[in-house]
Amino acid sequence: VAQSSGVEECVEERLRLFRLYDRSVDIVSAFEMLFTASKTALPTFTHHFERFPRLVANDGNEATPDFTVVHDDSRGLAAEIAYLPLNDQGVDALCRQILRYDALADLQAGDGTLRAVSSVDVLLLVPQAIGPDAVRRIIHDRLLDPEHFYKPSVAPIVVQFGFDEDRYTLQRLLDPENGNFRDDGRPQDARLSEWFKGSVFVRPERFREIKAQRAFVNDPIEPVYLATHLWAKTFATLAADVDGPLPKRIEVMPVELAARLRDDHGFVRKSDVDKALGLLRLARLAEPIPNTGAWTVAWDELRPRHKDAARLIAERACRQPSTGPVTKLRKLERAKTIPPRPPTLFDDIDNQDSQVADVKLPD
Amino acid sequence: LSPRDRREEHVQHPWSSFDEWLWNTAADGAVASLREVGEHLGGEQLTSWTLITTTDAPLHRISEIAGPRTTYRRASSTELLRIHDRDGDWLATTWPSGDLNAIHVVGAVPATDRRWDRFFRWAGYASPAVIQLVLDDAEITAMVRELEHYGPVGVSRLTARVRADKSSYARGWPVSGGQERPSFDAALAEIQDVASIRTLLLHVGTSITLHLRRRAGATFYSGDFALFEEVVLRLLATTAQRRFDLLSNRRRNRGARLNTAIAVELEAPFLDDPDAVTDLLDEMTRPHHLGIAVLHRNPYLHVVVTDYADGSNFDAFVTNDDRVIIHPGYRTTAAALARFTEVVSERFPTRVVEEVSAEDPPTLEDLLTTG
C-alpha cells in the first residue's frame, strides 16, 4: 500500500510540474502575442521579441530571462516568471538573477544579433496568490533595505497573473514602491505603463497559434511535458516514415532530436531531451542503444487508450513497469529473426499451428 | 426474455434475390451500372453512405479486416463484398463518385439494420482507407436547397436529437385529410434551437422519395432513380470531396506560424460545462488508433491529438464553448482531420466545419475589457 501511494504521489507531483510548465508556456505566449501580434500600437514599437534569450551578464554568468524585448527606442525589457520560494535564500537567489537582467547592456535583436539597450526594465511575473508577498519580500525587504545586496538601477515591475472567467488577468501591483514601465515618449496606446493602470485581460484563443507553434519556454523543460510532446507529436511525425505495425522502432540521437525540436518550435537543450528520454526509459517506452549515444523508441499506442497520454507517461515513469512497448518491440523483432523450421514429413496442419505457439522467445 | 437475450435475439434474413442478381452480374468481371442497379430494385429500397476514402479499393481493405466473414469481388471500378452476417448474408458495394476521395457504399439492407453497424465497425479499423462523414447543418441545408430546383421539397418525417438531454425526437406529418407536408424550413422551424436533425424523409415534387441522413447517407424508396443518382448522390459526393479538400494540405511548415486553422463550429454552446468536455475527450479517443495528450484543461482545453494509424498529430483547443479549433502539426493528413471532425460532429451537432484565421489578435480595447 505504501508503495502504491508513493507512485500516486509521484504521478501527482509530476503532473503538477507539468501544469506549472504549461502555464508558463501560456503566459509567455500571451506576452509574445501582445508584443508581436496584437492589434495595438505595441508591435509597431517592438523591434524584437525574444522567446528564448541567451545572454551573458556583466558578472560573466549566463542570463536566461523567460523573454526579452528590444523596443525601437532602444530601451529593453527582460521578464522572469517566478514562483516565489518560501525560504529567504531562494528569494535572494531570485534577486541575484534579476539583478543581472537589470544590468544587461545588450539584448538579442533577432537573426543572431545583439543590440545595445539604454536601459532594461525587469518584469517579474508572479501568480496572483503571491503578488503582494512578492512586492513585500523583493522590494520592501530587500531593495529598500540599505543592508541588502539587491540594488538594481530601478525597482522591478511586479505583475501578477491569474486565470478566471476564461481569460488570463494581468495586474501590476499598485504598491507605490513597485516599478513601472519606462516608456515615456511613445504614443499613449503603445505604453504599457498606461495599459497597466488597470487590469489587462488575455483570452487563450488570442495565443492559440503561438502556443501550438512555439510549444516551449526558456526554462528547462519539465521531463513529462517534453516526453509527452515527443510522444504525441515528434515521434508520431517520425513514425509516419516507418513501415510496419505498432510498436514502431524509431532511432534517435538526442543531439539531433534537440536540433529538430529547435527547428520546429524554438530553443530546446540537449539536456532537456536527455531527461525526457530518461523518463521514457523508466516508462519502458525507450531505451539507449549501448555504446552509440543513440536511443530506440518503441512508439506505440499507450494503454488504456482512452486515457490522457501525459498521465499515462507519468504513471509509467513513476511505476517503472518491467515490460512495455520496448520489451514488446524486442520480442517481436527477435521472433522475426528466428527462421521457421522447415516442415517435416510428420507435420500436419495442427502440429504446425502448435509449433507457432511453442516458439520460445529469448528474453 | 432478459434485455440481453432480447438484444441477442435476431432474425435470420435470407440472401435476397436482388443481392444474388447483383453478385452474379460481377462474376465474370463485368458489373451492372449503378443506374441498372436502381432500375432492378423492383420496389426494394437502396441505402447509400458517402464516405471519404484515400484508396481505390476501400472494400478490399475492409475485407482484409473482416477476414473469412466476407467474400470479395471486384468488377471494373466497382467493389462487391458479400458479408456472411449472423443476421443473414448481404451485399455491400462501392461505386466511385467521380470525385477522387468520395465513394458511395450501397446496399439493399435498410439503414437502421444492425448489419450496417457491424460493417461500419470494421470500417472504423480501415482508416484512413475509409472515413465516415457527418454532415454539418450548412451542408444539409445546401443539399435541400439544391433539391428544391427539381420540385417542391416536402418533409413527411424528421428525426432529431434534443440538445438538452440528448434524447431522440421523431415527428411525422401524415398527408391524410388534405394536409400538406411541411417544407424543409417549416419542419426545421419546429425544432429550431431545441433539437438537431438526424434524418429527413423528403419528397421532391412527385418524382422521388428519399431519406437523407446526417451521416452522409441517403435511402432511395421510390421514383426516379436517375434523379437520386445524379442529384442526391452527386451532392453527397461533392460535399464529401469539398470536406476532404478543406482538410487537405494543412500540414505545418518548419518554424512558421500558420495563417489558418480548422474550426468545428457547434450549433450551440454545448461545451459549457465540465461534463461536456469530459464527453468530448472520451469521444476523441473512441475511434480506433486516436489518442490524446491533455496539455491544459479547465477552464480552457488544449489537447494534442495523435492518430496512431498514420502518425498525424495536431493541437485541438476549446477556448469558446461553441467550437473546437484545430491547429495542424508537422504531419497532419486530411484523413486524420476527417476522422477527428467526424467524432466531434457525431457527438456535438455541428453548424459548420470551416477554415478560420489561426490568429485572432485583440485590440487594446479588447485587452482592457473582455480580453
Image (cartoon, coloured by chain):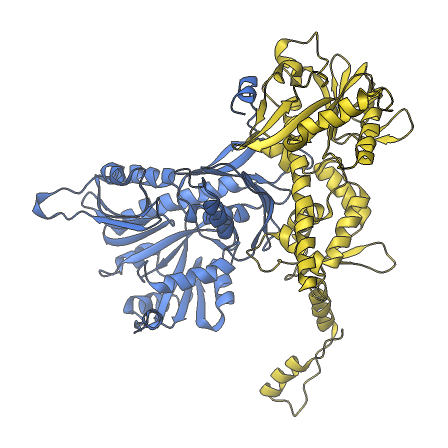
Furthest residue to the bottom?
Answer: A346
In the image, B118 versus B222, the foreground residue is: B118
Left/right of residue A149 with respect to residue A1 in the rendered view: right
Left/right of residue A303 with respect to residue B100 in the rendered view: right
Furthest residue to the right?
Answer: A60
Left/right of residue A145 with respect to residue B301 in the rendered view: right
In the image, the chain rendered in yellow is: A
**Residue at left 23%, top 61%?**
B42
Q: Can residue B257 be seen from the camera position used here?
A: no
Q: Position of residue B185 (x, y in %)?
A: 25, 36
| Quadrant for the N terminus of chain B in the image | bottom left
In the image, A325 versus A60, the foreground residue is: A60
**Residue at left 82%, top 21%?**
A145
In the image, the chain rendered in blue is: B
Furthest residue to the left?
Answer: B177
Task: Identify the image quadrant of residue A96.
Answer: top right
Task: Identify the image quadrant of residue B242.
Answer: top left
Count of numbered circles in the view: 0
**Residue at left 50%, top 52%?**
B282
Q: Position of residue A337 (x, y in %)?
A: 74, 72
Q: Position of residue B342 (x, y in %)?
A: 46, 48
Q: Is residue A34 above or below residue B199?
A: above
Left/right of residue A78 with respect to residue B185 in the rendered view: right
Q: Can residue A136 be seen from the camera position used here?
A: yes
In the image, B318 versus B249, the foreground residue is: B318
Q: Position of residue A101 (x, y in %)?
A: 81, 24
Q: Is residue A22 above or below residue B335?
A: above
